[in-house]
Image (cartoon, rainbow, N blue to C red):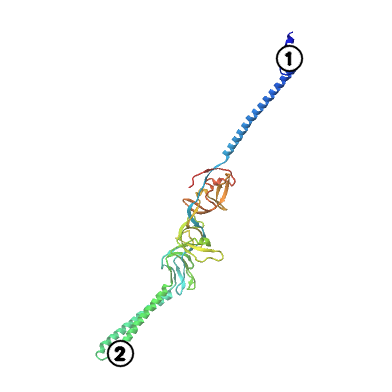
């Protein structure tokens, strides 16, 4: 009875759903529901795991990226811009004396008995440089001096005879013609005295020319004579003297640079091998251009210094007005066997070498007259530790 009621109730409930379910069908339906729920749970778990691991991977990637950013070195850069700096022309040339004076024998010459100076000595105007043997000329001078005494004695005797004749002419013992002859005799005697004196003066002048003297004060550059050497007016220069010790650089410049150089421009000269530079001024610009080399010559006057030796080689910096150019600190400009260069940072923050032409170097910095526009990011320091192509993190500094 009770079973019938249960089946009837089940029949009625399932009948409402439109089908009649047995007990086995109900169990299968429950199993399917459990499986579906389990699958959905597994899917949700998988999605959850994917989200979690995805976040971990992105976090690791971000951490790796941050770590990589920390490994990139940071460098200080400067954007120099452009400003007015001195335009430098940097020629090279040889050193020479402004006035190189050869000194030789002015007289008849003879054997050199003494040389009183050597190369490198300073001499005054008229100073004796060498002495030539003069014994023959000295004997001639003594003979001429004696002849002057003889001529003076004859002139004195002629004067005395004239005085006696003039005293007797009034008494009629001597005619006026005799007096006139005695006047002529006296005048001739006086003339012979003057001739003898002139001959002695000439002889002494010849003796004086046996002393080789400096025509001007200056520095002895060369000595080409020794005691015992026989010299004459055809022997050439026995000494070379730099007048006043003044030197110059005979710098060769291209035609376009020579057109910018004028007399009076300031310049700085540095001899090869010297650590010191010397100030000077342009004293001469040659009016002729060599048709073969298309170069001209500018001569830069500089005061005497020990490092300035004629015949040597030197470089010069001529300040030829002002130009607009980037100005960099010394630390930004480097050099090697290829020349001067700087490191710039490109748009990808990579190091790029840029060859530059350097102009004036002063306390303000280094003027770059070629190779930079002024708007580049130039490595300010640490350039020696970088290589082209390196990745860096630029840190901009204030322009100087």
* Nearest to N terminus: mark 1 or mark 2: 1
Residue 2 visible to the viewer: yes
Residue 141 visible to the viewer: no
Query: In the shown orientation, is residue 81 left or right of residue 217?
Result: right
Residue 181 falls in which quadrant of the image? Answer: bottom left
Q: Which residue is mark 1?
A: 11
Q: Position of residue 250 (x, y in %)?
A: 50, 62
**Distance between mark 1 and mark 2 Cα atoms:** 206 Å
Image point (72%, 14%), residue name = 12
Closer to us: 152 or 306: 306
Query: In the shown orientation, is residue 341 left or right of residue 20?
Result: left
Relative to residue 33, is residue 101 depicted above or below? Answer: below
Helix, strand or loop at mark 2: helix
Image point (31%, 88%), residue name = 180
Q: Which residue is mark 2?
A: 178
Q: Position of residue 327 (x, y in %)?
A: 50, 50
Q: How many marks?
A: 2
Image point (61%, 34%), residue name = 58
Closer to us: 340 or 212: 340
Residue ranking furthest to the left = 171
């Amino acid at each position: 009875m009770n079973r019938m009621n249960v089946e009837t109730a089940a029949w009625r409930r399932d009948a409402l759903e439109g089908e009649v379910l047995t007990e086995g069908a109900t169990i299968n339906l429950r199993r399917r529901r459990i499986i579906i729920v389990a699958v959905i749970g597994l899917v949700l778990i998988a999605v959850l795991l994917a989200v979690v691991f995805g976040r971990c991977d992105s976090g690791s990637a971000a951490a790796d990226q941050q770590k990589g950013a920390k490994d990139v070195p940071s460098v200080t850069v400067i954007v120099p811009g452009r400003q007015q700096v001195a335009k430098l022309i940097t020629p090279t040339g040889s050193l020479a004396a402004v006035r190189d004076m050869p000194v030789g024998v002015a007289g008849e010459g003879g054997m050199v008995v003494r040389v009183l100076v050597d190369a490198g000595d300073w001499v005054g105007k008229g100073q004796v440089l060498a002495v030539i043997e003069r014994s023959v000329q000295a004997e001639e001078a003594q003979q001429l001096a004696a002849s002057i005494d003889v001529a003076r004695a004859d002139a004195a005797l002629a004067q005395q005879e004239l005085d006696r004749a003039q005293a007797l002419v009034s008494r009629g013992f001597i005619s006026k013609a005799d007096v006139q002859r005695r006047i002529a005799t006296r005048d001739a005697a006086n003339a012979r005295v003057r001739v003898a004196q002139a001959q002695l003066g000439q002889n002494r002048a010849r003796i004086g020319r046996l002393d080789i003297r400096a025509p001007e004060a200056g520095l002895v550059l060369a000595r080409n004579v020794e005691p015992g050497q026989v010299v004459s007016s055809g022997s050439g220069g026995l000494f070379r003297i730099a007048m006043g010790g003044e030197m110059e650089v005979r710098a060769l410049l291209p035609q376009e640079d020579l057109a910018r150089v004028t007399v009076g421009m300031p310049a700085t000269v540095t001899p090869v091998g010297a650590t010191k530079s010397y100030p000077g001024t342009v004293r001469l610009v040659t009016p002729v251009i060599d048709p073969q080399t298309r170069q001209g010559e500018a001569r830069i006057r500089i005061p005497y210094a020990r490092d300035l030796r004629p015949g040597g080689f030197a470089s010069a910096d001529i300040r030829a007005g002002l130009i607009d150019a980037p100005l960099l600190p010394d630390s930004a400009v480097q050099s090697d066997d290829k020349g001067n260069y700087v490191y710039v940072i490109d748009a990808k923050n990579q190091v790029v070498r840029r060859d530059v032409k350097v102009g004036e170097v002063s306390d303000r910095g280094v003027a770059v007259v070629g190779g930079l526009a002024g708007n580049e990011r130039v490595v300010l320091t640490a350039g020696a530790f970088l290589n082209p192509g390196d990745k860096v993190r630029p840190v901009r500094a204030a322009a100087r």
